[in-house]
Image: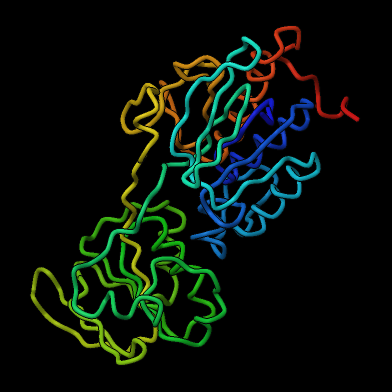
Amino acid sequence: MDLFDVTVVGSGPVGLYAAYYSGLRRMKTKIVDALPQLGGQLTALYPEKYIYDVAGFPKVLSKELSGRLEEQAMQYNPDVILNSKIENLSIVLDNKHSVYELKTDSGKSHYSKTVILCVGVGAFVPRKLDIFDVERLEGNGVFYHVNDINKFAGKKLLIVGGGDSAVDWANMFEPIAEKVTLIHRRDEFKAHEDNLKKMMDSRVDVKMWYELRAIYGEEHVNGASIFNNRTKEELNIDVDFVLLNLGFIANLGNIKSWGLNIVRNSISVGTTMQTNFPGIFAAGDIVDYEGKLKLISTGFGEAAVAVNYAKNFMDPKAKVFPGHSSDHK
């Protein structure tokens, strides 16, 4: 049994920070993630999107933030297991001491004295529209997220949605695209006020009360039909790309069967970030407690709390308070 002090499940921003802090506390650390690369959803879905609420960064690209966090975590050489989904979590005995077994979809097991779950909102898939040819043109002009912003330079782009992602992408593409059209089925947006004002003051063509009727193209998108859901007016527009920002459907998947206390589709934790299982902690968007805010900013703090209490759980002689980082060599 290759036993670790702590296993961090999930390698998004919160998971990487938890791995860094575990190394700082001199814990033998392993990271397990279902994705093929570190960085979690920020790397997989929003690498070109700016983040504005991380301390010390007026703005930072998702991929840059993930890269910095990876560099920070890797300095302590944690074991990294990618493309590996945890199917089951259970308690086993090692020399009469309880340890946790994390069994993956490949059948391999990982053993750990403590576990920190940093799995975001769980597995999720983008919401899709039941429109003819949308599925056929996915990847050929129809996208749900952006990995390379440069491919949109000088192109005509249609964005569908009224949330933060839709507005953020509209602001990001406005300086580089030939034209950006954003349609939203209502006149109210669920987006940050400042970003919404920037979009409204820009050259983005914002069409409220409009929905997508159809997408055209043989090998690649070359047009779309949109309609006003109040007047029924229909417009045909030339577009090279359609970006659908309709949200995601989150699913905790197998986590629900592990016996953890689930509240509002999240894992309930106490002030130490410990779950109802001793030695299993959680941090980030996956957790629920009174006053919880689902922000990267708060997730970093939760990761530090979880790690320090995991250290004390593993070794009761170790102080919870880690000391100041400037004291560590």
Decide which of 15, 37 is in the foreground and name it: 37
Query: Residue 308, position in %: x, y?
Result: 67, 21
Residue 17 vs 227, above or below: the answer is: above
* Vertical side of 296 occupied by 249: above or below: below
Q: Residue at x 60, y 39 (%)?
A: 15
Residue 319: % across, % down: 74, 11
Asked where in the image residue 23 lies, by quadrant, the reply is: top right
The picture places residue 14, in percent across and down from the top left corner, at: 59, 39
Quadrant position of residue 31: top right
Task: Give the residue displayed 68% in from the left and 27% down from the top.
Answer: 3
| Residue 137 in which image quadrant | bottom left
| 287 sits left or right of 60 in the view | left
Quadrant where the image shows the C terminus: top right
Residue occupying the point 55% across, 73% down: 148
Name the quadrant of the N terminus.
top right
Image coords of residue 188 (percent x, y): 26, 56
